[in-house]
Image (spheres, coloured by chain):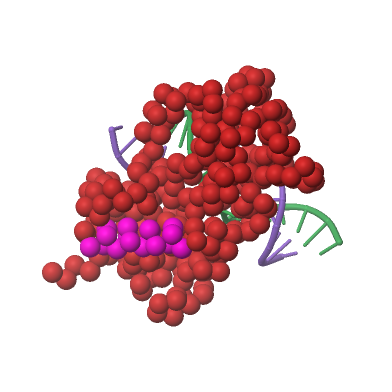
Chain colours: A red, B purple, C green
Amino acid sequence: MPELPEVETIVRQLAPALRGRAMENVRVLRSDILRESPHRFTAKLVGSTILAVRRRGKNVVMDLDPAQLLLVNLGMTGRLLLSDSGKNASPPDHLAVEFFLSSGGYLRYDDVRRFGHLLRFSPEKWKAESGRLGPEPLDPTLTPDLFYRALSTSRSPVRSWLLDQSRLAGVGNIYANEALFRGGIHPARKACDLDPGESEALLVGLRSVLRDAIEAGGTTLRDYRTTTGESGGFAPSLQVYGRAGDPCPACNGPIRRIVFANRSAFLCPRCQPEVESSVS
DNA sequence: CATACGTCCTGCCAGC
DNA sequence: TGCTGGCAGGACGTAT
């Protein structure tokens, strides 16, 4: 569910609302969301103050005082729901963890499939962990040349390359497919086969779709919600994802769905040819 | 080392 | 109406 634009949307809502507030109590209802005992998790967090909320890849990262980090990976169906006022919203159907905050509100983590995780890190451990993730796609220091060189080291299909968090942090199946369409690149082509021009077109397409989706508050297909429970607005703007059989917005030919690496890929066969045009 | 595949879990939807 | 199989936005462990 949540890829970079969805997590960015959540973080932009949480950051101003949570900054400076303390966790007065923590209640764990589904401990398989954690990788430590609920008792230890709770004991280490109660009394902490939230200094900042930010994003790294698809993770929500909270900086706490005393110094530690709380990372939320939403998996497929995780939601962070914020109730700022005193009034009690009825609990969501799959409530996993509740944080009771100073000034009376609370933050709830809800997750149908429980593929998500809530993880604590020391600053040192987080630094190492973050180092295992690839660069942020929207970071301007990721130049077209660096992007091209990174692609050129891998024989994986370029769609798989985009999904690999250790190569690039934050891209999931929706935006990988949309970026490949915008860049005119077939998803099954080997990453190392893209030429510099194609590589740059892909980077431009990726950045544009991520920015557009952030602008719209993310894509809700089914489960994704903002912290107030609202849907994102980008779904109608998807050009290929989930649109098998629909006309291509560029050439009117039918969008196709193919499956590889156990996941659906959507593409326009005409706009995203399988083999690069070896004209020269 | 790099890449490929099965698995975790629940809910929903199309098709019979 | 009710059942069944297929499918889902992620990420990790294991096998090759």
Total marks in image: 0
Is residue A103 in view? yes
For residue A15, side relative to residue C1 (left or right)? left
Q: Is residue A77 above or below residue A200?
A: above
Q: Is residue A110 above or below residue A264?
A: above
Q: Identify which residue is drawn at 63% across, 39% down.
A: A114
Q: Position of residue A6 (x, y in %)?
A: 53, 52
Q: Position of residue A164 (x, y in %)?
A: 40, 44
Q: Identify which residue is drawn at 50% across, 61% down.
A: A215
- From this viewpoint, which residue is outermost toward the left? A280
Q: Position of residue A43 (x, y in %)?
A: 64, 20
Q: Which residues are magenta?
A: A197-212
Q: In this rendered view, identify the residue nearer to me: A74 or A112.
A: A74
For the C terminus of chain A, the image quarter is bottom left
Find out whether residue A202 is within the magenta segment. yes
Q: Is residue A29 above or below residue A90?
A: above
Q: In this rendered view, identify the residue nearer to me: A268 or A107.
A: A107
Q: Position of residue B4 (x, y in %)?
A: 39, 45
Find out whether residue A11 is within the magenta segment. no
For residue A263, side relative to residue A189 (left or right)? right
Q: In this rendered view, identify the residue nearer to me: A142 or A202.
A: A142
Main secondary structure type of the part rendered in magenta: helix
Q: Identify which residue is drawn at 71% across, 39% down.
A: A105
Is residue A186 in view? no
Q: Quadrant of residue A95?
A: top right
Q: Identify which residue is drawn at 43% across, 59% down.
A: A211
For residue A257, side relative to residue C2 (left or right)? left
Q: In this rendered view, identify the residue nearer to me: A181 or A143.
A: A143
